[in-house]
Image (spheres, grey):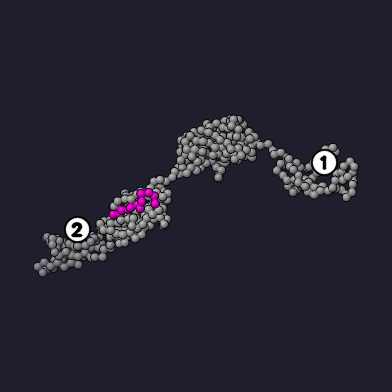
Amino acid sequence: LVNGIANAVTNVTVEPQAKTVTLTLSTAVTHDQTVTVAYADPTTGNDANAIQDAAGNDAASFAATAVTNNTPAPADATAPQLIITGDSRPKVTGDQLVLSFSDTGNLDADASHKPANGAFTVMVNGVANAVTNVAIEPQAKTVTLTLTTAVTSDQTVTVAYADPTTGNDANAIQDAAGNDTASFAATAVTNNTPAPADTTAPALIITGDSRPKVNGNQLVLSFSDTGNLDADAARKPANGAFTVLVDGVANAVTNVTVEPQAKTVTLTLTTAVTSDQTVTVAYADPTTGNDANAIQDTAGNDAASFAATAVTNNTPAPADTTAPALIITGDSRPKVTGDQLVLSFSDTGNLDADAGHKPAGGAFTVLVNSVANAVTNVAINAEAK
């Protein structure tokens, strides 16, 4: 049976002195197949057509018995192939660029056969980075290139390879059977170089749209940083670390909220700010070093203390519910010159000058020496009121 399927015997040869029986099979076995053999003695006694010795003693029947398969594998004629997908795709960490290959055998790691440094072209952000050494791991089937300059985490890398000749040669990426890897064009390399440790503290932004601002009882501070702010509730700064002055009077902070990705710290004030008030904010870092209860990034870098800093007041003015009032005293009291009679009004906002909204002439009664003088036109100066 070969892989569980019967393979008929076409001939039986007996070597008397070697004491062997050789069976010729209908189909040759390949190196990767499993083989068993069983034998049935024709009769229970000694007989002529059996495996027997010269004295006529029959060999006993035997059940399916494992056979060692010594059939050689076919000759390796397949060259190693660069793996460009999955976990084994080309990758670089610092100055070490690793290429992985698929092959039925191992790579040739003979130092006198390895490819020259110049057979590889490594581009980092489009600029050549020369290879200074080539190391081959035969069983891992990897080729590791050492680069002149270590790659940083934010750079883009490609690698290309030129096989020295069109045939198999000594100085090439090749397997143990001597099959050369084909040249390959610029191929993307995964950059596994870690980003450098973050040692820069968050900095308060005091200009532009992200400058400190307040709306009602919410005062927002925005920070610049390479990473996110630390939003762990157990590490946020204390309310008392902030000093908020509204028109020069302290307005205590009742809560601190940190938004890590937005990189903002929002202070809730005891008393809401009104639209016409001036606001400043100051912050005191609890210690001179990095500590748990401070404005800090996820790497633990503390924001520095800052002195009283102007806050943009975005609190809207209260809704206008007071009607314009005619001014009847002072320089703005009603006055007439010829046919022009001017009425002035006090109001927090401007008058409505929309032509579709102005009052009719008949809404006014003008008496001159107790005699009616009709109004022929009404004109409104919105800002002059």
Within 10 Å of the Cα at label 1, are there few (<14), some (14-19), or many (20+) other Cα atoms?
few
Q: Is residue 354 visible?
A: yes
Looking at this view, is 333 or 198 the one in front? Answer: 198
Question: Is 287 covered by the magenta stretch?
Answer: yes
Report x, y in % for residue 292: 40, 53
* Magenta region, residue range: 280-291
Label 2: state its secondary structure.
loop
Report x, y in % for residue 36: 76, 46
Report x, y in % for residue 56: 90, 43
Quarter of the image where one finds residue 259: bottom left
- The amino acid at mark 2 is Ala
Cβ atoms under marks 1 and 2 closer than 8 Å: no
Quarter of the image where one finds residue 22: top right
Q: Which residue is pictured at 62% across the width and 31% down the height? A: 168
Q: Which residue is mark 2?
A: 384
Q: Is residue 210 visible?
A: no
* Sooner in the amino-acid sequence: mark 1 or mark 2: 1
Looking at this view, is 114 or 338 the one in front? Answer: 114
For the C terminus, give its image quadrant: bottom left
In the displayed structure, does residue 25 sit left or right of residue 217? right
In the rendered view, would you say 268 is above or below 132?
below
In the rendered view, would you say 378 is above or below 180?
below
Q: Which is more foreground, mark 1 or mark 2?
A: 1
Looking at this view, is 105 or 80 the one in front? Answer: 105
Question: Is 93 covered by the magenta stretch?
Answer: no
Q: Which residue is mark 1?
A: 21
In the rendered view, would you say 280 is above or below 77?
below
- The amino acid at mark 1 is Val
Q: Which residue is pictured at 87% across the width and 43% down the height? A: 52
Q: Which mark is residue 211?
A: none
